[in-house]
Amino acid sequence: MSHSSRTRRIAGCTLVVIALGAGVTACSSDDGNPLSATPYDAAEHISFNGPTKAGKKADPDKPLEITSEGSEGRITDVTAVDAAGRHVSGELSADGGRWHSTSPLAADAHYTVRVSTEDEDGAPGRRVVTFDTGKPRTQKRLAVTFGPEAGKYGVGQPITADLSQPVKDKAQRAIVERGLKVDSNIVVEGSWHWVDDKKLHYRPKEYWPANATLQVRSNLDGIKISDRLWGGTAKPLKITTGDKIVAIADGASHHMTVFKNDKEINTLPITMGKPGFETRNGVKVVIGKEYFVRMRGTTVGIADGTSESYDLPVYYATRVTWSGEYVHAAPWSVGDQGSANVSHGCVGMNTSNASWFYETVRPGDIVQVVNSYGKTMEPFGNGFGDWNVEWANWRKGSALVTGSPEGPDETERVRLQPQTV
């Protein structure tokens, strides 16, 4: 085929139309070449539905649509990405005649769309178009705050996302959830779980890998969530995990066994909650360490002057619930450690062992209580009991899982108080 005949064939073979529902400014084309050294121009011209008056921008509420007109060519691929690197998902018809977006465009963004085509002889074509979207009609934005703070944590540390506005509708929750990204340099299966209308937690199916790097970000900025709510900004988060530290506190044997990277490194005599003050069973996550805490029975409703009242200085206190459950030094109960449960709910040990434990663990490490007569640790609201939710039920808390409920019930928040000894 001569150059002139190819030119004639191409000029009439493909018309690409991008329908955005509004005029677009600053449109341009680029005959870049990802497929061939001499790609042909895939369209004689590009047109947009709606006004093309200078200063007009595309409506981000409208889907992006690209069609190929003419029988001699078809679309083979479309890539649409904004200046922040966010890709627009889309579907291409089986005959290559139409591509349309399936994820929303961001407001107030600059997009580059690359359309690849193929003529009847299999020769590749290319067309690149840029456009801007307008600002949302409302200024109500959904800000996201990720937690915990940047740093190194244990393998049990969940990721949290606090929203500035409540999101109740499941379809809107799905938009939010798709925009919240958690990446690990070691691949794991994980999921977000809606704790309530304004909070999500993310955890993997099993504990995080040891010595991993986790990066959390939001792609919601400028994305429409509802008619009155658009995605806002969020500061990205980077944390790392340390060694895998898991401590198993056994209420029957009255000992705690500590494992590092699945190898036992210490066994410590302990005492746990006595009848009426039983230590909670289940998996708990270390949420803080306090060298000194003054613990008073009045914080858990024990009146001064009664047989159960106490007011004690406590050292090497490793916190596992907001309501005041710790692993700490309890020199007053050394005679019962390893043989009986006599505390008001905490895990007590001698001062030397408590100091060793305090120096060994960090926030995010695991303390698992077994064989206590206490209730199971709450999943939310009193620290991180996330790991007490079976994986199948955890996944049901995601808005992206078929058959999941509209969202879990609101969880009562527990006030931060020193509590048990």
Image (spheres, rainbow, N blue to C red):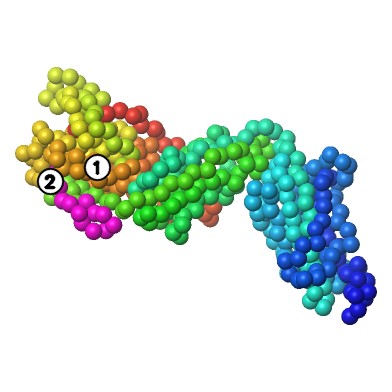
Query: Which quarter of the image is occupied by the N terminus?
Result: bottom right
Please report the residue visible at 70 percent of the width from the left and 42 percent of the height from the top: 107
Q: Which residues fall within the magenta stretch?
A: 258-276
Q: Which mark is residue 106?
A: none
Q: Please tell me which of labels 1 and 2 falls first in the chain.
A: 2
Q: CA distance from mark 1 to mark 2?
A: 17 Å
Q: State yes or no: residue 323 in magenta.
A: no
Above/below status of 9 relative to 355: below
What count of labels does the image hold?
2
Residue occupied by mark 1: 359
Residue 351 % position (x, y): 14, 37
Q: Could you tell me the amino acid type at mark 2?
A: Pro
Q: Residue furthest left?
A: 335
Find numbered disc 2 in the image and state the secondary structure of the residue it sits on.
strand
Q: State yes or no: residue 263 in magenta.
A: yes
Residue occupied by mark 2: 269
Residue 205 % position (x, y): 40, 56
